[in-house]
Image: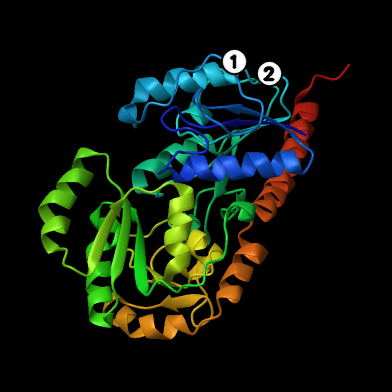
Amino acid sequence: MRIGLIVGPWFTVPPERYGGTERVVDALARALVDAGHEVLLAAASDSTCPVPQLNGFGPSAPEALGCTLSELSHVVQAYQGMQGMDIIHDHTLAGPLYAHRPADTPVVTTIHGQLTGQSAGLYRAMAGDTAIIAISHDQRSMVPDLDVASVIHHGLDLSTVSVGDGSGGYACFVGRMCPDKGLMEAVRIAREAGVPLRIAAKMHAKDEVRFYQEVVRPFLGPDEEFLGELSDPEKYELMGGAVALINPLQWPEPFGLVMIEALATGTPVLATRMGAAPEIVRHGETGYLAGVGELADYVEAAVSLSRAACRRAVDEYFSATRMAEEHVALYSRVIEEFRSRAFQAAPSA
């Protein structure tokens, strides 16, 4: 199968540090190639994903994140270079709405963000000629009337992640510097449990810097250490040494890649029951799900959970191989339906 993958222009594939969508696309591209498919990637020119890439794009530009003009010019160029693909998987928001994409090629798209009332209208408009993938059942449930072709959980390339022994004597928080991720709650949970907390967080945007300077930094004490934003090897080392990842989400996150990353290192996850967390964490087996006021009670219990079981859960349910297999199954169905409609619409001789 010849598969075109389009990702936005702002971060590299894979990302050097922060970047959930780009990390998922990298894992998917590699797994598809490993399965024998041809992949063509449209991404920032400084991407290092080891698959064939379209030429002519500029380098990643995180400072332009969310810029409409930047994304539109990127997807127009991407579709112009996607001739001859069997299917195009577009991971941008603007691309599936582009009117001049190849008429003879079906397109699928993934909802990577929160499915709100405003974005739901855009995806409803796409659904007429684009197959839509949700990344969790919770995300899909937000708009029950949206025509979703499949729910496919994210996957992780386990060859890049080693299992840690959790001997560091600390808990960790990994995420973005914003209230929604629950950093302040994580600090309170760790303090109540009497365990040091090591914090790794992305902090680029002005609102992230302001939140850190005005709210987080004045609150941190001697048992909390802010490490900044880490590379993947540094992040996995941090997670692997932790007794638990504290992830007290304060919003319905559609998936939460950080949770499967922690589990892959053998580290249990303590999370609130928001978003897709119940689809990822098995209460009492790979972590615990509870309200913020209860999570401190589970820190000590997390130490006794099997780190091998945490790793095994990712291998069985959240591997890049499984993710690629489910995508290929959907691609095949979409291609078959697309060709059937084209045949039925063709004028008879």
Q: Secondary structure at mark 1?
A: helix
Q: Quadrant of the C terminus?
A: top right
Q: Quadrant of the N terminus?
A: top right
Callouts 2 and 1 close, C-beta under 8 Å: yes
**What residue is at 43 percent from the left and 78 percent from the top?**
288
320 horizontally vs 47: left or right: right
Q: Quadrant of residue 219?
A: bottom left
- Residue 271's label in the rendered image is none
The x and y percentages for residue 192 are 23, 80
**What residue is at 34 percent from the left and 62 percent from the top?**
173
Q: Quadrant of residue 182?
A: bottom left
- Residue 80's label in the rendered image is 1
Visible in this render: residue 254?
Answer: no
8 horizontally vs 337: left or right: left
The x and y percentages for residue 347 are 80, 19
On screen, residue 127 above or below 99: below
Q: Amino acid at mark 2?
A: Gln
- Residue 83's label in the rendered image is 2
Disc 2/disc 1 C-alpha distance (Å): 7 Å
The x and y percentages for residue 331 are 71, 41
Q: Amino acid at mark 1?
A: Gln
Visible in this render: residue 288?
Answer: yes
Judge by depth and name the residue closer to the eye, 21 or 198: 198
Give neighbour class at mark 2: few <14, some 14-19, many 20+ (Cα, 10 Å). Answer: some
Q: Quadrant of residue 197?
A: bottom left
On screen, residue 285 above or below 77: below
